[in-house]
């Protein structure tokens, strides 16, 4: 069974980095628009707080989580935005305190989870390590949106390896959620991490291959950049199709981002 400790430690570091961006913001800067249409900085943090709370319920109170799923099924197109909107309406100091408390509660619950346990989610059930990985992915992705809104630059770290692994593992999900047949053969994925290390997945002799930088791959699978703006190379028709539809997050296909310079 995968030990969740390394990814939980990296999740804490990723959360702390984002926290430093927003900790001293004036109330006006919490209302700055981010690249996600209709979402301010406050909406981004509120969404992370809402998802941390839902994740903690999935680990500690599955009956309560089941009621949250019922709410989502009753408003499938709105429940994510509704959660972000509700949190963003709080005073910034309250929202920040709620996010900090919620992510600590989730980390404590995941560290205390029985070995091998799996927890319900809006998609397939997840282990403690998988849930922590999903939270790191979202924290990084929404943190990118916050940094863009604030005009800040964040340096990529090797914590991206968790998001890369998730992006590779969700290949079949991406095809399925688009109603496309799942490729039978595995792909070869070769990506260079921020420290220069090469991260590889799949058989060396695979016909379909994806190569490039780990940062660009993470931007792709979190749909924080359009494929046309990324230095990723696909060989083979199935790998090429994958780069058009890849997503590492649960739920319906995301709308993605428009290419730079494109007219909206």
Image (cartoon, grey):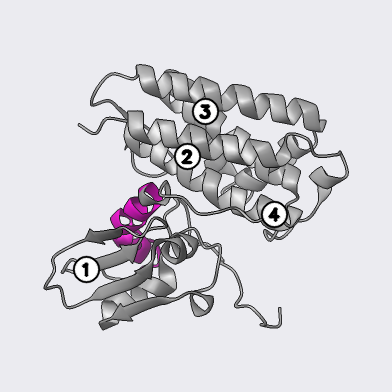
C-alpha separation, residue under disc 3 versus residue under disc 4: 38 Å
Numbered disc 4: secondary structure:
loop
- Give the alpha-carbon distance from disc 4 to disc 1, as whole Å: 34 Å
| First to last magenta residue range | 162-179
**On the rendered structure, is 66 left or right of 209?**
right
Who's the residue at 62% across and 41% down the image? 18
Q: Position of residue 37 (x, y in %)?
A: 71, 60
Q: Are marks 3 and 4 in contact (CB under 8 Å)?
A: no
Q: Is residue 243 magenta?
A: no
Q: Which residue does the numbered mark 1 point to in the structure image?
A: 188
As drawn, is 37 to the left or to the right of 245? Answer: right
Q: Residues within 10 Å of mark 4 (few under 14, many from 20)?
A: few
At 55% from the left edge and 68% from the top edge, which residue is drawn? Answer: 225
Query: Which residue is rendered at x = 37% and y = 47% of the image?
Result: 162
Q: Give the label, 3 or 2, closer to the camera.
A: 2
Quarter holding the C terminus? Answer: bottom right
Describe the element under mark 3 as helix, strand or loop.
helix
Q: Earlier in the sequence, mark 4 or mark 1?
A: 4
Question: Which residue is labeled 4 in the image?
Answer: 152
Mark identifier at residue 135: 2
Q: Residues within 10 Å of mark 1 (few under 14, many from 20)?
A: many
The residue tagged 3 is: 67
**Mark sitting earlier along the chain (3/4):** 3
Residues tagged 3 and 1 counted as in contact (Cβ below 8 A): no
User: Looking at the image, is 180 positioned above or below residue 32?
Assistant: below
Q: Quadrant of residue 15?
A: top right
Query: What's the distance in space between the residues labelled 1 and 2, CA to CA?
Result: 26 Å
Residue 186 lies, with reference to residue 87, above or below; the image says below
Residue in view at x 78 percent, y 56 percent: 33
Q: Nearer the viewer, mark 3 or mark 1?
A: 1
**Label located before the other in sequence (3 or 2):** 3
């Amino acid at each position: 069974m995968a030990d969740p400790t390394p990814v939980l430690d990296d999740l804490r570091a990723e959360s702390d980095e984002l926290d430093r961006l927003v900790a001293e913001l004036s109330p006006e800067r919490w209302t700055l628009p981010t690249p996600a249409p209709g979402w301010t900085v406050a909406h981004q943090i509120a969404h992370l707080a809402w998802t941390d709370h839902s994740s903690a319920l999935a680990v500690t109170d599955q009956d309560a989580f089941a009621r949250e799923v019922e709410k989502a099924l009753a408003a499938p197109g709105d429940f994510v935005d509704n959660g972000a909107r509700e949190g963003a309406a709080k005073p910034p100091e309250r929202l920040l305190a709620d996010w900090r408390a919620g992510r600590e509660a989730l980390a404590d619950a995941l560290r205390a989870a029985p070995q091998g346990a799996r927890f319900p989610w809006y998609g397939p059930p997840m282990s403690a390590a998988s849930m922590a990985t999903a939270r790191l992915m979202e924290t990084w992705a929404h943190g990118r949106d916050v940094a863009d809104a604030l005009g800040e630059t964040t340096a990529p770290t090797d914590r991206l390896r968790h998001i890369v692994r998730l992006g590779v593992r969700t290949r079949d999900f991406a095809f399925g959620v688009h109603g496309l047949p799942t490729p039978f053969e595995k792909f070869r994925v070769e990506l260079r991490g921020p420290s220069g290390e090469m991260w590889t997945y799949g058989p060396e002799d695979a016909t379909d291959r994806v190569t490039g930088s780990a940062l660009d791959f993470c931007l792709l699978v979190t749909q924080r950049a359009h494929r046309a703006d990324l230095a990723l190379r696909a060989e083979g028709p199935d790998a090429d199709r994958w780069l058009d539809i890849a997503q590492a997050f649960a739920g319906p296909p995301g709308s993605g981002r428009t290419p730079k310079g494109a007219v909206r």
